[in-house]
Image (spheres, helix red, strand yellow):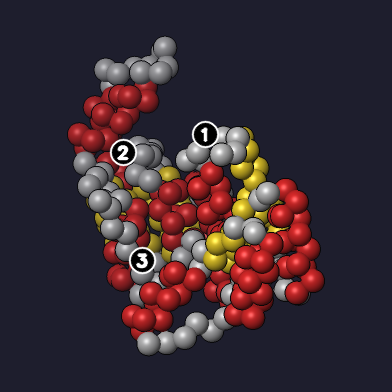
Amino acid sequence: MTEKLHIFAVSDSVGETAEKIAVASVLQFKVERSITRFSRVTKEEQVMEIIDQAAEEDAIIIYTIVKPELSALLANKAQERGVRAVNVLLPLFEVIQEKTGLKPSNISGLTHKMDDHYFNRMQAIEFTIEHDNGQDLEGFGDADLIILGLPRTSKTPLSMHLANLGIKVANYPILHDTEIPDEILELKGKVPMVGLTIDIDTLMELRRERLRSFEDADLDTLDEQVAEELDNAYRIFAKLKCLVIDVTMDDVETIGNTITHRFNLPLKVSHRRF
């Protein structure tokens, strides 16, 4: 029995996967624990150095080395030195290979490959942050999608969800006295636009909860204000010919799928909850 647990997370890429698995595992045990990540391990001498250190410190090795020769070397040498080593990729590789009849490509770091999709996604996220809640109106013309909506209709979470799919999104808030700026009016028919609305009873409850935190909140006029906001939103949506989506019952993934399908925007994702 040991009162201390030391895990080496070893990878021929950046090592995030091995480290996360190590963290998730050690948290289940109430012992003193520490994790050391070894990244970019691509040479035999590096493997031998790690095994020597693991033997000295009585550490467990968790590794995600995809090169078969280097992975086999680590497994064999660890066994010779009496070091416990676990290839966390191997069981899944074997199942996928059996299922598909294909062999893995054994290319390191595929999840961090700096391909076009990665850069597009980063640019989309940066753009969406810079054009959140009506910021930088002059840049709205560069958006792939413009979202307009009442407060509490998840404009920002939806925008960020779509940005993670590589879609540049700008969003603009609508209140009871909002007038749509010329910068957006000029984009009618040029940039896809979506208007978000919500059930009036749900919106009323959300507003009440928010206003209760303010000492001088006027709840008596809330009904009228919310009705005016909804009326103004629908007038604006009609003027811009937006696709109108009621967000009352759906999550951002479902709404995002509706939008990407309607405007033929890139990617479609699904999320199954249990």
| Relative vertical location of residue 100 with respect to residue 17 in this rendering, above or below | below
Residue 125 in the image, given as x and y percentages of width and height: 55, 59
- Mark 1: amino acid: Lys
Residues tagged 1 and 2 counted as in contact (Cβ below 8 A): no
Dot 1 crowding, Cα within 10 Å, few <14, some 14–19, many 20+: few
Residue occupying the point 24% across, 45% down: 248
Residues tagged 2 and 3 counted as in contact (Cβ below 8 A): no
Residue 52 in the image, given as x and y percentages of width and height: 76, 59
Residue occupying the point 53% across, 54% down: 21
Residue 72 in the image, given as x and y percentages of width and height: 61, 76
- State which mark lies toward you, 1 or 2: 1
Residues tagged 1 and 3 counted as in contact (Cβ below 8 A): no
Q: Which residue is mark 2?
A: 229
Q: CA distance from mark 1 to mark 2?
A: 54 Å
Of residues 232 and 29, the one nearer the viewer is 29
Query: Residue 269 has which mark?
Result: 3
Residue occupying the point 34% across, 44% down: 153
Of residues 73 and 189, the one nearer the viewer is 73
Q: CA distance from mark 1 to mark 3?
A: 38 Å
- Mark 2: amino acid: Glu
Query: Residue 30 has which mark?
Result: 1
Query: Which image quadrant: the N terminus?
Result: top right
Mark nearer the N terminus (1 vs 2): 1
Dot 3 crowding, Cα within 10 Å, few <14, some 14–19, many 20+: few
Residue occupying the point 55% across, 62% down: 86
Mark nearer the N terminus (2 vs 3): 2
